[in-house]
Amino acid sequence: MSIGLHVAILYLISFVDTLCFGLIMPVLPTHILGLGGNHTSLGLLGMFHMLLQLFAVPLGQTYSNKFGRKTWLIATLFVGALTNISMGIVIKFPSVIIIRLIFYLTNQTQTICKSFVTDIETKDMHTVVYSRMNLLGVVGFIIGPIVGGTLLDMEHGFYYISLITFGLTQFTMFVAMILPSDKRSNKSRHISSNLAVKLFDNFISSFDSIQKIQIRINWNFVLMKICTTVSLTVFFMKFALLLKILHNRNNTGVGIVVAYQSFLIFIANILVPLTEKVYKGQSVKKLSHSLSLLTISMANICYAPTFTMYLICFIPLSIAKCIFDSAFRDVSSNKSLGDISGGLDTIATITSIATPPIFGYSCDFYTHNAVKSFTIIPLIIVLFVMHFSTKKQFSKFK
């Protein structure tokens, strides 16, 4: 079969995967709360989601090498379909959480699709194909939340969502059978041994990257990374709570906002390179300005008096977030600091794992006020650190 057909199949599988994720993920917390769960249980789900990502990648690589990408892709789609339909059938929230965690551990659809590209497409087309996959992913995560939120407002809405995602995933599983088979690994080591070695190597490399930071010297950058990670993790995990309590939005309204925010962040990421014309390599100045804008925007969005103001305030927030991420990456990878970006990424991962259960427990007592505290206060701390404790490091930059 032609290369064009195989690439089109990968586009389809990648799009459906993000569409299904967009259908379920924004409404899943509401469904769990409706079954009797609390914010602590949602926090534990978020924690294990992040934790399982550390195992999912080595697991996917090991089984892909052992059985081939095509076989592992079909297997993950099959498990995904089963978990999707199962979540709509069970009526106990712990069962929903366990089923979803199985999905997080086994789902590697996006990674496998992109690795397939290297086998069936010429090297000069890789970037183009990856960009199109990313664009389709954005479209899927815009359409999915709108449809998912609308369905959840219906009686037995989550069951309909699970049924639709089950059907779509099953369809892509059968379509994936058309893809060409790739060669299996001929390594003699047992699969569990391979997996253990990869997990151990990942742990060692992560630990080494943290050691390179020299925390006693660069503690302010570490604190910056921790605080911004806490703030953004909590906001994007719980902004629906603000919408429902402060602005009386239903699930359809929340779904529309999720789509709106996804679109704005996509556009903001495209516009980030244009900031170089303004700052002309002044990464520190860009970092300072974007952090200030991010803090102001976050405070405004948390205390927005109307729903319209919430939507307006998210525009500068999305721009500030993307610019800050870019500027912080440039600063932390600067040679004068010894390129501490890898270690800071590891710290961000650890923070993303620890934050959800701590915040979830607080949210059970203080609800939307906990959201405000966990999003605004860390950014204010970062502002003080930025302006009063980093002059020596920043003097090294142009």
Image (cartoon, rainbow, N blue to C red):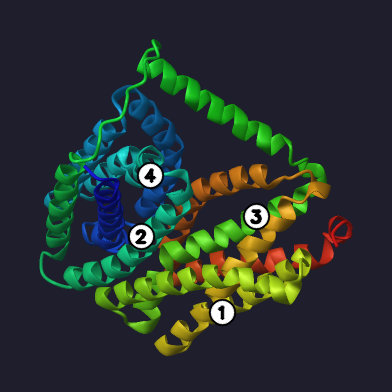
The mark that comes first in sequence, 3 or 1, is 3
Identify which residue, 335 or 185, lies in the foreground.
185
Where disc 3 sits, the SS reads: helix
Measuring 17% from the left and 69% from the top, which residue is drawn there? 151
Above/below status of 257 relative to 312: above
Q: In this image, 255 relative to 284: left or right?
A: left
User: How busy is the neighbourhood of tag 4: few (under 14 within 10 Å), some, or many (20 plus)?
Assistant: some
Where disc 4 sits, the SS reads: loop
**Which quadrant is the N terminus positioned in?**
top left
Which kind of residue does numbered mark 3 sit on? Lys
What whole-number distance in Å separates the C-alpha atoms at marks 1 and 4? 39 Å
Measuring 22% from the left and 44% from the top, which residue is drawn there? 95
Residue 298 locus on image (x, y percent):
56, 75
Which residue is under mark 3? Answer: 225
What whole-number distance in Å separates the C-alpha atoms at marks 3 and 1? 20 Å
Residue 249 locus on image (x, y percent):
31, 80
Which residue is under mark 2? Answer: 137
Which residue is under mark 4? Answer: 121
Residue 85 visible in the displayed image: no
Quarter location, residue 133: bottom left
Is disc 3 in contact with disc 1, using a CB cutoff of under 8 Å? no
User: How busy is the neighbourhood of tag 2: few (under 14 within 10 Å), some, or many (20 plus)?
Assistant: many
